[in-house]
Image (tube, helix red, strand yellow):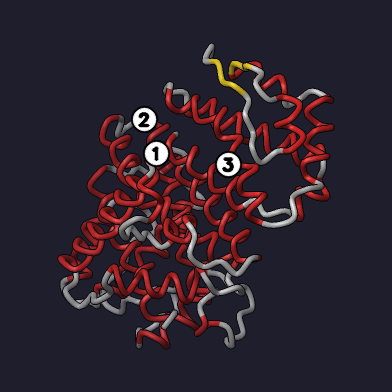
Amino acid sequence: MNEVIVFNFESSRYLGTNLLGRQYTIQDYKSLINTPEFAELIRKDFSLIQNWQAADKFFQEHTTFIINSFLSGRQTLGIEMWLSLLERIEQIDSGNYRKIHKGTAYYHAGVYSLFAGHYDKAFQWFEYAFEQDLRLQRSETPSVWILTFDIRENQLEKGNEYEYTKKLLCRIEQIEKEIILHDSRFSLTVDSLRGIVKSKIVCDLSFRSLRSALASLLASFLECEGTERFLKIAPNSNEAQVIVNNFLVNMTLILETFIKKSPKAQNIPLQKGGIGELYQKVIAPNYNFNYTSDKCFLSNYQISKNYSNMLNEIRDAEQSEDKLAVAFTVCQRVRNISHHIFNEAHINEELFRNLTLRMYYAIFSVIGKLYV
């Protein structure tokens, strides 16, 4: 907390001139941003920001103070400082704050959240950053590279977030291999997935809510392993079951969003838009599955509406039924359980691994079939 930083803002005419050369500790900086002096200088500097380059440089230079929190291992403090700065600037001049480009600000909030292991928040920040980039019709930015798990040479400037993007890509590739081992018919490659994600979801201006679902999906790839480890360490704890249940709830919402927002669902009248209706009117016709009256694709095997014997039932069903149809049915059963009775349900490590594999199979299949 005692690191001393010299204030030297080249892009901030009034901040730079009036605070140049002053020395601050991190605590001093936190106090500084709440002073009337800081507010007055921010208002003057904001009036000079006329383009996105100037806005980027302005926000970039503030990281000089915040990055030291991360270098000293205090990731949560760094996130809090960054959010405090953004809240304070919005409070000082909300009109200009709304107008200027905040891609760099939101991107850094995502990076700091990523370092702290707050994956869901991190990818939502990256999605917010890209929304800012879209306003400028910029389609090749660090936020795009992360949202499309792209690690081509020289991208992300080889910062620490590059390592997380590599980890994300490895997790997606691992899941792809597991799905292929599970069902050899699966043919969606990671490169094909990236192409669909970038052209049909990320860069399509009409798909804002879908980009949020994508952000949650990408976060889940990094969260899944940690969730499974938590379950392995404390399999019978209520806390582990709550964490697992919340993860599964999120996965079902991601799947439903991808189905409902798909191009092939746009001209289909949906009364309630529930999962049963989506399966009946969108999934079944596009996959040639039978949709039975009890809202289950399987004609010969039934998957329970609880977890007690689900793993054996899934395996029995997959002996003679379409494995993708079973995967969709598993998603529906998980949805019905996880949204209502998680306190009565118990999921062990093996069941969790099998459920998530089939849920990823269903989600990948929807992206690969309904978005081309």
Q: Position of residue 330 (x, y in %)?
A: 35, 64
Q: Position of residue 100 (x, y in %)?
A: 72, 53
Mark 1 vs 3: CB contact within 8 A? no
Q: Position of residue 258 (x, y in %)?
A: 48, 70
Q: Which image quadrant for residue 7?
A: top right
Of callouts 1 and 3, which one flags the residue occurring earlier in the amino acid sequence?
3
Q: Residue furthest top?
A: 2
Number of residue marks: 3
Please name the residue shown 56% across and 70% down the image. 274
Which label belongs to residue 237?
2
Please name the residue shown 74% across and 50% down the image. 49
Front label number (2 vs 3):
3
Q: Residues within 10 Å of mark 3 (few under 14, many from 20)?
A: some
**Relative depth, front residue between 302 and 106:** 106
Q: Which image quadrant for residue 225?
A: top left
Mark 2 vs 3: CB contact within 8 A? no
Task: Please name the residue that numbered disc 1 is placed on.
Answer: 241
Of callouts 2 and 3, which one flags the residue occurring earlier in the amino acid sequence?
3
Task: Please name the residue that numbered disc 3 is placed on.
Answer: 60
Left or right, 140 with respect to 364, comes to right
Q: Residues within 10 Å of mark 1 (few under 14, many from 20)?
A: many
Label 1 to label 2, Cα distance in Å? 7 Å
Please name the residue shown 30% across and 56% down the image. 169
Under mark 1, the amino acid is Gln
Label 1 to label 3, Cα distance in Å? 41 Å
Depicted 135 relative to depicted 32: above or below: below
Under mark 3, the amino acid is Gln
Mark 1 vs 2: CB contact within 8 A? yes
